Image (cartoon, rainbow, N blue to C red):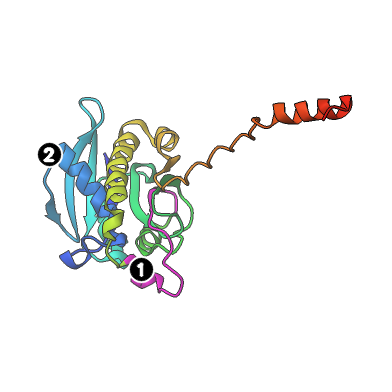
Amino acid sequence: MKLVVGLGNPGLKYAQTRHNVGWLVVDEVARRAGASWLKAKDAEVCEVRLGPAPGEKVLLVKPQTFMNASGKAVLPLFSFYKLELGDLLAVQDDLDSPFGLLKFRMGGRHGGQNGVRDMIRLLGSEGFARLKIGISRPPAGRDPADWVLSKWHPDEATTLAELVRLGANAVEIWAAQGLAEAQLQFNGTDLRPKPPAPAPATPASSESEPQDAEASAKHIQGLP
């Protein structure tokens, strides 16, 4: 059994906010598997099998405790199934990565992500994997706390849909083939628009060269 926690806030008010991108990813994994969400204490859960048949059993989790108390939803499930830290993946938004980037990381500090912070606090360890989905830093002068709770812009919809699709793929690979393979396949993901290629240099015109050569020859020969 593995545990995949999509971090986010409950309620329609937060459904399409940047902070809830983890929920979008686990929702996509559940949709592909044709599985339904069930209510548990402090969480919604969904059991799926991922990878080649018979598949790895995975419990998808959406904490219902609000972001800052995510560990309260995770710890009872982690303990009930007697899991190891290597069996746990948190899917999170990441302020410090540009929008369009996706990467796995094993362990480390919470980086200001309060859902991860609370999981570390209650699990008593930083030693679990994270799938970090970039949402970019806010524009100058905007409060980061307000930014993470803001809704996606319409012009971000295409990139967001692709990030969610790739995020679900990444969860499936992590569950079936492990963290190292998932990092190998997905840590280079970068959906940011590429700058336009520089225009090719215009070759110098050679049309005047024969005239210049002729003029030079006439000058040398003393011809008019």
Evaluate if marks 1 and 2 touch, with contact meaning CB atoms under 8 Å apart. no
From the top left corner, tell me how far across and down residue 108 is, in percent: 48, 53
Secondary structure found at label 2: loop
From the top left corner, tell me how far across and down residue 16 is, in percent: 23, 60
Camera sees residue 199: yes
In this rendering, would 44 be left or right of 221? Answer: left
Q: Nearer the viewer, mark 1 or mark 2?
A: 1
For badge 1, the amino acid type reads Trp
Q: Going 17% across and 46% down the picture, which residue do you hit?
A: 46
Secondary structure found at label 1: helix
In this rendering, would 12 be left or right of 170? Answer: left
Q: Is residue 163 magenta?
A: no
For badge 2, the amino acid type reads Gly
In this rendering, would 126 be left or right of 173? Answer: right
Sequence-wise, the earlier of marks 1 and 2 is 2
Which residue is labeled 1 in the image? Answer: 147
Q: Residues within 10 Å of mark 2 (few under 14, many from 20)?
A: few
From the top left corner, tell me how far across and down residue 3 is, in percent: 28, 45
Q: How many marks?
A: 2
Q: Which residues are magenta?
A: 126-148
The disc placed on residue 34 is 2
- Kindly report the distance in space between the C-alpha atoms of the residues bearing marks 1 and 2: 33 Å
